[in-house]
Every structure is written in C-alpha cells, then in structure tokens.
C-alpha cells in the first residue's frame, strides 16, 4: 500500500508560515522558508524552475518522485490561492480537506468528512504512489488518526517568531525514528519514520 508522508519547510522555532499568512499574501513574511528551492545550481528533475543545491536536489527529487496525490488543508489552500486551480505538485492531483465548502477546479477534489476520507480519496487518485500531506492542521489530524508513515522536515535556519505552527496540540506522544539527516546550504533535511 502507498505511504502517507508529510514534507514541509519549517523554521527552527516550528513555523510553516510567517506573520499574517492568507489569501493575497501567501506565507506572510515567511517566504524565506523556501529560499533553498532556488539557492543552488542543480535543476530539479520534477519541478520546473527549481535550482537546488546538489544535496537538496537529491533529497527533494527523490521525495517528489514518490508523490502521486496531495492532501492540503483549507488554510494551505487559501494561502496558496487555490494553487491556481492545480496542485502544489506538478504531476499529482490535489485533495482539499475543508469542513466548509470551497470552490475547486476539475483537477481538484473536495473532501469535507475528515482526514481519513481525504487520505482515502488521495490514495484512489495516486496511481499506487505515495500521498503527500500539506499544512499543519492536516498533518496534526493525520497524526491523531495514525495515518502518517513518514515525516520530513526541511528545517530552515531562521527563527520567524510568529506564524502558523507546523504541529498543533496532540493528544499523545508520537515517536519518531530518524531515517536520514542531510545538511545542505540554507536547509537541513530531516527524514523520520513515524512509529505508531
């Protein structure tokens, strides 16, 4: 069965956006979390326009090549202005998880009945590949339901001081096992298996 993974850029103090994120201003003042997408001389083989450092390209492209569908929460969807009717991944369809109605394109699927149903819908669209999760609320809900197999933190050496936290309140401890840690210019890629 395909795996469910979350890979997000995060500040050292645990934020995935800066101050005042939202429609019209994206990640607020947290854009620096993605500078590593463009600070190298190795072109991504999956994402056009990304020029990564060699270590980041190895990690990023291996991960991106595994993704067959993406689940994003409503905040992420709104912050990204609906991904322009597409998805945060160039080849993977998007499942939007929202408890409120939201307009979606023909390339997107809306699920309003919870994270388990969103993951199920994404698996059906993924062509046997892995499902990627986007957004702190979505990741937290999936951890609560024991749905995540792997967690990848692209940790950027910055303290944002405020923004949306990656992790929300969890009802229990979640044990992680380190698979790999890769230092790279402007980011450290930390790959964990989730041990439920």
Image: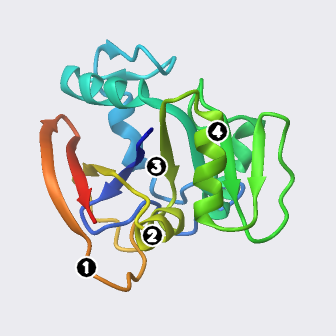
Which of the marked residues, 1 or 2, is nearer the chain's N terminus?
A: 2
> Could you say whether the residue bearing mark 1 is in a helix, strand or loop?
loop
Mark 2 or mark 3, which is nearer to you? Answer: 2
Q: Residues within 10 Å of mark 3 (few under 14, many from 20)?
A: few
Q: Which residue is mark 3?
A: 31
Front position in the image: 39 or 100 = 100
> Residue at the front extreme?
1
Q: CA distance from mark 4 to mark 3?
A: 32 Å
Q: Which residue is mark 4?
A: 124
| Rendering coords of residue 44 (x, y %) | 39, 17
Residue at (69% x, 41% y) in the render: 83
Quarter that holds the N terminus: top left
Q: Residues within 10 Å of mark 2 (few under 14, many from 20)?
A: many
Front position in the image: 159 or 173 = 173
Q: CA distance from mark 4 to mark 1?
A: 30 Å
> Could you say whether the residue bearing mark 3 is in a helix, strand or loop?
helix
Q: CA distance from mark 2 to mark 4?
A: 22 Å
Does residue 144 lie above or below 37 as drawn? below
- Residue 16, disc: none
Q: Are marks 4 and 1 in contact (CB under 8 Å)?
A: no
Q: Which residue is mark 2?
A: 140
Which of the marked residues, 2 or 4, is nearer the chain's N terminus?
A: 4
Quarter that holds the C terminus: bottom left
Q: Are marks 1 and 2 in contact (CB under 8 Å)?
A: no
Q: CA distance from mark 2 to mark 3?
A: 22 Å
Mark 2 or mark 4, which is nearer to you? Answer: 4
Does residue 156 lie above or below 56 as drawn? below
> Could you say whether the residue bearing mark 2 is in a helix, strand or loop?
helix
- Residue 173, disc: 1
Mark 4 or mark 3, which is nearer to you? Answer: 4
> Could you say whether the residue bearing mark 4 is in a helix, strand or loop?
helix
Residue at (61% x, 51% y) in the render: 120
């Amino acid at each position: 069965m395909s795996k469910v993974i979350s890979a997000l850029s995060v500040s050292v103090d645990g934020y995935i956006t800066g101050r005042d994120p939202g429609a019209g201003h994206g990640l607020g003042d947290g854009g620096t979390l993605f500078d590593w997408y463009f600070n190298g001389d190795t072109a991504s083989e999956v994402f056009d326009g990304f020029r990564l450092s060699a270590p980041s390209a190895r990690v990023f492209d291996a991960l991106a090549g595994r993704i067959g569908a993406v689940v994003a929460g409503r905040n992420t969807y709104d912050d990204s202005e609906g991904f322009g009717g597409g998805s945060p991944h160039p080849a993977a369809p998007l499942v939007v998880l929202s408890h409120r109605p939201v307009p979606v394109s023909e390339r997107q699927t809306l699920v309003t009945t919870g994270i388990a149903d969103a993951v199920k819908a994404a698996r059906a669209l993924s062509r046997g590949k892995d499902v990627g999760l986007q957004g702190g609320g979505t990741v937290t809900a999936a951890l609560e339901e024991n749905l995540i197999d792997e967690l990848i933190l692209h940790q950027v050496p910055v303290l944002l001081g405020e923004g949306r936290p990656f992790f929300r309140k969890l009802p229990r401890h979640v044990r992680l096992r380190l698979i790999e840690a890769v230092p790279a210019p402007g980011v450290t890629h930390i790959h964990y298996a989730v041990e439920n």
